[in-house]
Image: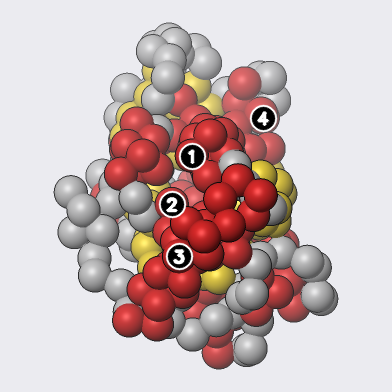
């Protein structure tokens, strides 16, 4: 699959970055500060390394829950790009004057998995219905789209009220995964990207019709509007090398 066509204004930004890189060469290498949704940690690290090898630019990554990252952006944190875990904050960033109009695009579609380190615990939705566990971890649904998706899925299955007393909340999807990995929760709703590299434990990929699509959008922030490294990163993110990494880590892409 390939990404959708992007606005003309973004194409102009990307073309300008590419032209500048052609003229300046390696001497133009710079730094871009990227705020990254926690679920995209592993993929972003790999993309940043490829970006460095391809362009010479350094991508400095800061990870966290999307809501918390956006709050920092509104308080003038010096981020050049936001890689959100939803499509709401990038649009809001443009509306509120923190993002550059015409630069928003979907870079990934997140997928939710019910996961346990115990090999036989998770067998499907019946695991939730049986309730044979003491604690289940989810990311904070107020700030983390993966947490909101977990609540939506449990609500759609009609099990949320029964499961709610057993919920432990992580600040973001990384902490939620740590709760499961360390045994503080027997199971939890995590991102497919976090467990795609291993067959350990047990898991159930939650049917996507049970929750609103986790469309993860990127936006160039006003702070990075004149940063050639930021423009180059936005362009690289929708290119074939980055796209291959995104799919490798279990994300969908927009047609």
- Label 4 residue SS: helix
Q: Earlier in the sequence, mark 3 or mark 4?
A: 3
Residue 22 horizontal side relative to residue 11, left or right: right
Residue assigned mark 2: 236
Mark 3 and mark 4: span between their CA atoms?
Answer: 47 Å
Residue in view at x 62 percent, y 89 percent: 96
Residue 4 image point, x, y percent: 24, 65
Q: Earlier in the sequence, mark 3 or mark 2?
A: 3
Residue assigned mark 4: 179
Residue assigned mark 3: 19
Residue 150 image point, x, y percent: 46, 50
Q: Nearer the viewer, mark 2 or mark 1?
A: 1
Quadrant of the rendering where the C terminus is positioned: bottom left
User: Can residue 147 be seen?
Assistant: no
Residue assigned mark 1: 54
Mark 3 burial class by Cα count in 10 Å: few <14, some 14-19, many 20+: few
């Amino acid at each position: 699959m390939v990404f959708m066509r992007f606005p003309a204004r973004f194409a102009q930004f990307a073309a300008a970055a590419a032209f500048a890189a052609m003229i300046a060469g390696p001497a133009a290498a710079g730094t871009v500060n990227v705020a990254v949704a926690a679920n995209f940690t592993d993929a972003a690290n790999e993309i940043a390394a490829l970006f460095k090898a391809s362009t010479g630019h350094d991508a400095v990554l800061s990870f966290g829950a999307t809501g918390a990252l956006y709050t920092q952006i509104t308080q003038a944190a010096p981020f050049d790009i936001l890689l959100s875990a939803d499509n709401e904050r990038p649009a809001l960033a443009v509306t509120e004057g923190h993002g550059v109009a015409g630069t928003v695009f979907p870079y990934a579609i997140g997928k939710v998995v019910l996961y346990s380190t115990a090999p036989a615990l998770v067998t499907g939705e019946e695991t939730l219905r049986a309730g044979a566990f003491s604690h289940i971890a989810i990311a904070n649904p107020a700030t983390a789209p993966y947490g909101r998706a977990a609540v939506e899925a449990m609500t759609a299955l009609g099990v949320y009220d029964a499961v709610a007393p057993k919920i432990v909340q992580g600040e973001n999807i990384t902490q939620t995964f740590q709760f499961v990995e360390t045994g503080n929760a027997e199971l939890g709703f995590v991102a497919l990207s976090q467990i795609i590299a291993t067959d350990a434990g047990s898991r159930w990929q939650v049917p996507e019709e049970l929750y609103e699509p986790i469309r993860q959008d990127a936006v160039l922030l006003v702070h990075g509007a004149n940063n050639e490294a930021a423009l180059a990163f936005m362009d690289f993110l929708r290119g074939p090398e980055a796209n291959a990494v995104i799919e490798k880590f279990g994300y969908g892409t927009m047609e």
